[in-house]
Every structure is written in structure tokens, then in C-alpha cells.
Image (cartoon, helix red, strand yellow):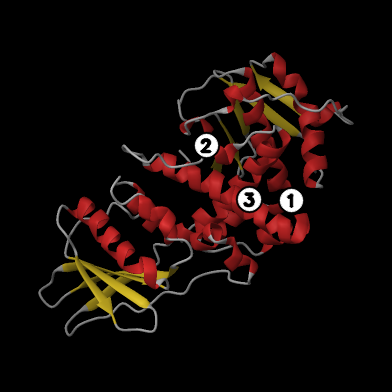
Amino acid sequence: MRGWQMVISGILALTCGFSTVSCTTTAIEATAQSRITFEGDTPAWADSASSVMTELEQWRGLSFKENLAVTFQPQDDPGLNGWYNSETKQLVVTTSGSEALGRGIMLHEMFHALQDQHFDLYNLHLQSQDNSDYDQAVTAVIEGEAMLAVSELLNYDFLAHAKLPAEGPINDQLFENIFLYGAGLKFVKAVRDQGGWEAVDAVFADPPQATTLILNPERYLAGERTVEPTEVPLEAGETLDSKTIRGEYAIRLMLARLPETRPLVDSMNNSYVTDTLGVLTNSDGDRVHRWVIELNDQETSEALAQGIKTALAGDLGEEPLLELLPNGNLRYLFEMKISQALSFTR
């Protein structure tokens, strides 16, 4: 349900929600009660919404330009607690959880409305919709800033819970939430720590176009905005049909799915340079996926390459070919002769 038109807050998908958090907000008298209206079965705690608007404005240093309409409704999807639709401007908060959770979700979604009124979230996603790694990076900025607001205004240590379990299975939604809310929060905080809110404003005008820049904010702060594709080698008689950058997020997700390769997620550090997945047809008419990954850390590169091979084998049911390519950087090539789409793609 989380498409590029919507910024969804599936916070309950994490292991800890707002139910243990004190959500008492500072008593600030709202300057314009008419700025917010309610639809649906309005809970008693909705009375704090005007104060929340004022708190958000003071915390962020931006004012709401337009009135808000908040729709309250029962929760139909257990993993979906609220959302803000940047195309229709609809703001929904579900009421099936605790008061503390509902107030936290309301703050989170109202902050998305504030972002949208200043930075046009719909247009940001339009710009990135054709590149999944770019769109994930943009979404992490949006969700990370909203979660920073929740963490600081409600005194909620979200990062204490945004961790992968060491053992057992994980689902892709949990991994995505940890990235969007956790890594996104750390990215926005790093930008603010260096340049204040003015620097965060500038991120929306010139966003990171790769997830590796979210995971390694020092690279964005040093001036990087994207990663360039690397060469996919072709043999005689082969035709390259398409190529795409999968991104550091896709690599980490693939490693995280298996308990035996999960420790490699954190060991990646800043070793990712770029990658390119090529889909080609060989001289026999076979469909081949050839994925080239560039790393720059000698200490971890071999372990990462073997881990990626293991993770791919879990997807394919057989081990892919792994080859180290000669180049200035550490370039690893994984070749898979398959007809179906790989599950690590989005």
C-alpha cells in the first residue's frame, strides 16, 4: 500500500511502538484553532492537535501555510497506523491503538503535511519514481525527518529499537522500516548537526539519489549526490538488454534475509562504491543476469562477496558464478542464468 504517492507510517511493524512512551506534549496555546478540522469518530486526545501544530512549527522553524483536515478511522490493516497522501493531501490517523500511539502517529503525519506544504513531496517522488534506489533515498529523507520530530518532541528513543534481530527470520517490511525511519533519521540529524535547518531545507532541493548516501551521510555532506553505473562486461555474441543500479539498500536487504549473512550488513561500513545489474541475452539465446559490484574496502570485500554469493544462492536455489574483475577498485561479478526475476529486485 506504500506507493510513491503516499508517505506511510507503518510504525507498529517495528518491535516497539509508542505504547511505552510518555506522549505528554508541552502546553502551548494554539494561535489559530480554526487551522485544523476533524472528520470521522474523533477521539478525545485529538484536542491536542492545534498545540501539536504549534510545537511542530516552533521545532522546525516553519509555519503551516494551509489548514489541515485530519480523518480518524478504525485500523483495517494491522501494519498501517496512519498516512499522509501528498497527492490528495489526505491525512489519516487510525484509532484502534492506544492513546499514546494515536498521538504519536498524529504528530508524525501532521509533520508530513508541514513538509509537503514547503517542499512538495509529490513532486519529489515524481522525480525519483523511475529509479528505486533514488526513490528509497528520497523516502528516507522524508520519513527520517518525521521520525526525528517524533523522537525529539515526544522524547522517544526510536534508534534503540531500530535494529535487526541477530537470529531468526525477518521480513522485508521490517528491514525497510528500519532503513526509512532509522537510517533516515540519522541522515537528517547529521545534516542538521553540520548546517542547521537551513542545510536540511537544501536537501529537499537537492536530495540524495542513492541509498548509500543515506547510509553514509558523510558522503552526501562531502558533495556526492548520486552513484554512477559501472561497466557490465559482454562476451562475443551477447546483447545487453537492460541495466540498472540496485544500490546499497538492495545488497543489505539481501544479506539481512539470512541469519548466516546478516552480520555482514553492519560490516559493509562505507565500502560500497557502485553496482550495476545487467540483463543480457547470450549467443545461445539464454537470459543472463550479470551483476557487477564495486567495493573499496580490502578487509571486508572478500567476505562481502562470499556473503552476497550465499544470499543469491538462497534466491536461486543454486550458487551463482563469482568472479573478481581486474580494475582499480574491487569489482565482483555475479552471473546467473535464469529466466525469472530475482527476488532482490523491487
Q: Secondary structure at mark 2?
A: loop
The residue tagged 3 is 121
The residue lying at 76 percent from left, 31 percent from top is 52
Residue 194: in sight, yes or no?
yes
Other residues around mark 3 within 10 Å, as few (<14) / some (14–19) / many (≥20)? many
| Mark positioned earlier in the residue sequence (2 or 1) | 1
The residue tagged 2 is 161
Q: Position of residue 158 (x, y in %)?
A: 58, 38
Measure the alpha-carbon separation of dots 1 and 3.
Answer: 9 Å
Measure the alpha-carbon separation of dots 2 and 1.
Answer: 30 Å
Q: Secondary structure at mark 1?
A: helix
Mark 2: which amino acid? His
Q: Is residue 293 left or right of residue 289?
A: right
Other residues around mark 1 within 10 Å, as few (<14) / some (14–19) / many (≥20)? some
Mark 3: which amino acid? Leu
Mark 1: which amino acid? His
Q: Is residue 222 left or right of residue 235?
A: right
Q: Is residue 35 left or right of residue 163?
A: right
The foreground one among 85 and 44 is 44
Measure the alpha-carbon separation of dots 3 and 2.
Answer: 27 Å
Q: Secondary structure at mark 3?
A: helix
The foreground one among 202 and 76 is 202
